[in-house]
Amino acid sequence: MMWVDRAFVAFLALGAAGHFLGSLLLVEPGSALQVWSLSGVLCVALIVALNVLRWRRPGDRALAGIAGLGALAWVAVALGFGASLGHFGDFRVLWHAAAAAGVAVFALRDAMRAR
């Protein structure tokens, strides 16, 4: 199951990379929208980093909990984006929500494991 966990984090990292490129190429440079879009990139990149760190520290339940709650928050952000579009079936919404939900499942499972 470890490879499935890592695959979800990799999918989330790919989503972050796509979000970054889209922010740079498709949004007016220097605009408020670009700043907020790049802040989303930072947020999801930190969630990815926390989960990579979680793999290196398998007994750290607090880290796993923070990583899992961060991923759950990103699911909410992705769904909020879908709501703002009026289209939850948008590829970007589905990609980010599914990847973050998968990450959250594995991270929260690690957080709840008995020592």
Image: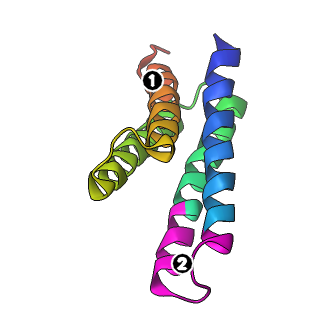
Q: As rendered, which of 49 and 79 lies closer to the eye?
A: 79
Q: Quadrant of residue 3?
A: top right
Q: Quadrant of residue 22?
A: bottom right
Furthest residue toward bottom: 30
Residue lying at 34% horizontally and 49% vertically, measured from the top left? 82
Please, is residue 42 above or below residue 80 in the view? below
Which SS type dominates the magenta stretch? helix
- Whole-Å distance between the Cαs marked 2 and 1? 31 Å
Pointer 1 local density, CA inside 10 Å: few below 14, some 14–19, many at least 20: some
- Residue 51 image offset from top left, x and y in percent: 61, 38
- Residue 94 image offset from top left, x and y in percent: 45, 37
- Residue 72 image offset from top left, x and y in percent: 38, 39
Could you tell me which secondary element the residue under label 2 belongs to? helix
Q: How is the image coloured?
A: rainbow
The three-letter code of the residue at mark 1 reads Val
> Does 16 sit left or right of 62 as displayed?
right
| Residue 16 disc label | none
Please, is residue 104 above or below residue 36 in the view? above
Residue lying at 50% horizontally and 28% vertically, measured from the top left? 107
Residue lying at 52% horizontally and 79% vertically, measured from the top left? 35
Could you tell me which secondary element the residue under label 1 belongs to? helix
Please, is residue 103 above or below residue 110 in the view? below
Q: Which residue is mark 1?
A: 105
- Residue 87 image offset from top left, x and y in percent: 32, 46
Residue 15 located within the stretch drawn in magenta:
no
Q: Which residue is mark 2?
A: 34
Q: Quadrant of residue 9?
A: top right
Q: Quadrant of the N terminus?
A: top right
Mark 2 or 1 closer to N-term?
2
The three-letter code of the residue at mark 2 reads Gln
Q: Provide the residue span drawn in magenta.
A: 23-40
